[in-house]
Image: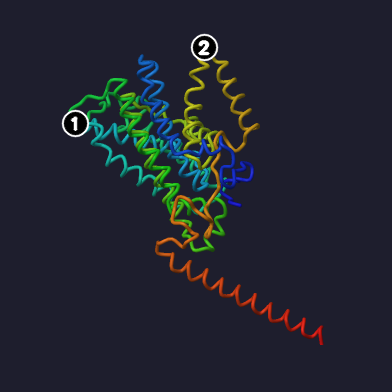
């Protein structure tokens, strides 16, 4: 089992979905349904408070999907993920303020800086495992916050103010509703990209490393490069979340990137179900909206929030929506792909047909041989 994260305490579902409800939860149409709900929401409640909470929840979904690449797919415990969000937010704020650029023009700089940050922290530390990697990432998060707190270019403890909003093709998207729609579109595309990454060849390598890093390395997977790729992709997702965060609040300060934020993002991934993008989205929505629903209870809401989280972890340790560990086996009938019964017409079809002919030939030869032996025995008994 992986030494990065002990997944034995969080059992996953194995095999095809058996019940109707399970197949419904695995339906590809649920993503479109969630997108439709997000688009319809401003038509139901459009006041500034609701838009502010909803936009924060959407950005939180982006952060959780980025951390899911690192923790859920690859099994690397990252306790300082909010540092990448800080790098993205400060890069967007500094570049847009210094050169008076629209904030969307800072995206290349944001991606470049977050990739560099991922390389700087990931290259020397990803050879570590388990608790050692968690401690290093925790230190990285605190170093970024303290650096931003003491540099002049980052505004020191006061941070950066007056960050411009989003403008696209001359259209001002700074209003709460329009910025919410912009965030929904951007975050949906990035969440979809995260899900596609998880199903790609690189995603399968990440899962292999998560389950057993030594076995993956023995099978020829360059585990260091695979883990570094996960770290860089996670950093890019976090940087984009920071850019949206800076554009949303128009002001950032070091107090926005404390360890508690990293813990909440990690909690959303674990609570939703590590490795499952849909579960992570549900977990992020619950973590971001539940304290707001309990706001009328004052400080008691944090106690209730903690009790609810503990109860969920005790009653459902695998998360709300755990990943289903299932890979179609070779030779298994597949209704959606090339039919394995007739060998298909793909590149491997000729080899499969030849294998079946050889198997049939061997089987037929074995039956004939068995028949000859039986006849010989019968003749001997008769004699």
Q: 70 or 255: nearer the eye?
A: 70
- Residue most toward the front? 382
Q: Which mark is residue 296?
A: 2
Choose the circle earlier in sequence order: 1 or 2: 1
Q: Which mark is residue 66?
A: none
Q: Which mark is residue 169?
A: 1
Q: Is residue 255 visible?
A: no
The residue under the point 68% across, 78% down is 371
Q: 11 or 130: nearer the eye?
A: 11
Whether residue 377 sits left or right of residue 256 in the image: it is: right
The residue under the point 43% across, 60% down is 344
Residue 340 picture location, percent across and down: 49, 59
Secondary structure at badge 1 equals loop
Circle 1 packing at 10 Å, graded few (<14), some (14-19), many (20+), is few
Circle 2 packing at 10 Å, graded few (<14), some (14-19), many (20+), is few
Residue 258 picture location, percent across and down: 46, 30
Residue 296 picture location, percent across and down: 52, 12
Q: Are marks 1 and 2 in contact (CB under 8 Å)?
A: no
| Residue 160 in which image quadrant | top left
Front: mark 1 or 2: 1
Q: Is residue 176 visible?
A: yes
The residue under the point 22% across, 24% down is 172
The residue under the point 48% across, 68% down is 353
Quarter occupied by the C terminus: bottom right
Residue 321 picture location, percent across and down: 54, 36
Q: 81 or 278: nearer the eye?
A: 278
Q: CA distance from mark 1 to mark 2?
A: 41 Å
Secondary structure at badge 2 equals helix
């Amino acid at each position: 089992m992986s030494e990065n994260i002990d997944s034995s305490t969080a059992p996953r579902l194995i095999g095809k979905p058996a019940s109707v409800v399970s197949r419904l939860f695995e339906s590809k149409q649920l993503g479109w349904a969630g997108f439709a709900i997000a688009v319809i929401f401003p038509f139901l409640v459009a006041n500034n408070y609701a838009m502010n909470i909803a936009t924060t929840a959407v950005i939180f979904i982006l952060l959780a999907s980025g951390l899911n690449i690192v923790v859920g797919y690859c099994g690397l415990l990252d306790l300082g993920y909010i540092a990448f969000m800080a790098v993205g937010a400060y890069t967007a704020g500094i570049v847009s303020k210094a050169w008076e650029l629209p904030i969307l023009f800072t995206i290349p700089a944001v991606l470049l800086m977050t990739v560099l940050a991922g390389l700087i922290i990931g290259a020397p530390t990803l050879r570590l495992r388990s608790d050692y990697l968690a401690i290093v990432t925790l230190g990285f998060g605190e170093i970024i916050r303290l650096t931003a707190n003491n540099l002049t270019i980052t505004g020191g403890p006061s941070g950066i103010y007056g960050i411009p909003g989003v403008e696209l093709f001359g259209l001002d998207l700074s209003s709460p509703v329009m910025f919410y729609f912009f965030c929904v579109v951007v975050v949906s595309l990035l969440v979809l990209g995260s899900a596609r990454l998880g199903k790609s060849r690189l995603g399968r390598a990440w899962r292999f490393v998560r389950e057993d890093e030594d076995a993956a390395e023995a099978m020829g997977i360059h585990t260091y490069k695979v883990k570094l790729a996960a770290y860089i992709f996670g950093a890019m997702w976090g940087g984009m979340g920071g850019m949206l965060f800076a554009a949303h609040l128009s002001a950032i300060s070091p107090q926005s990137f404390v360890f508690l934020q990293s813990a909440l993002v990690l909690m959303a991934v674990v609570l939703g179900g590590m490795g499952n993008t849909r579960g992570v989205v549900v977990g992020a929505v619950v973590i971001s909206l539940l304290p707001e629903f309990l706001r009328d209870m004052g400080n008691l809401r944090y106690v209730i929030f903690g009790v609810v989280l503990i109860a969920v972890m005790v009653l459902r340790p695998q998360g709300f929506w755990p990943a289903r560990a299932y890979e179609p086996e070779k030779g298994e009938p597949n209704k959606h792909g090339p039919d394995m019964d007739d060998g298909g017409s793909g590149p491997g079809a000729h080899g499969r047909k030849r294998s079946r002919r050889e198997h049939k030939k061997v089987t037929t030869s074995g039956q004939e041989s068995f028949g000859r032996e039986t006849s010989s025995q019968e003749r001997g008994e008769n004699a």
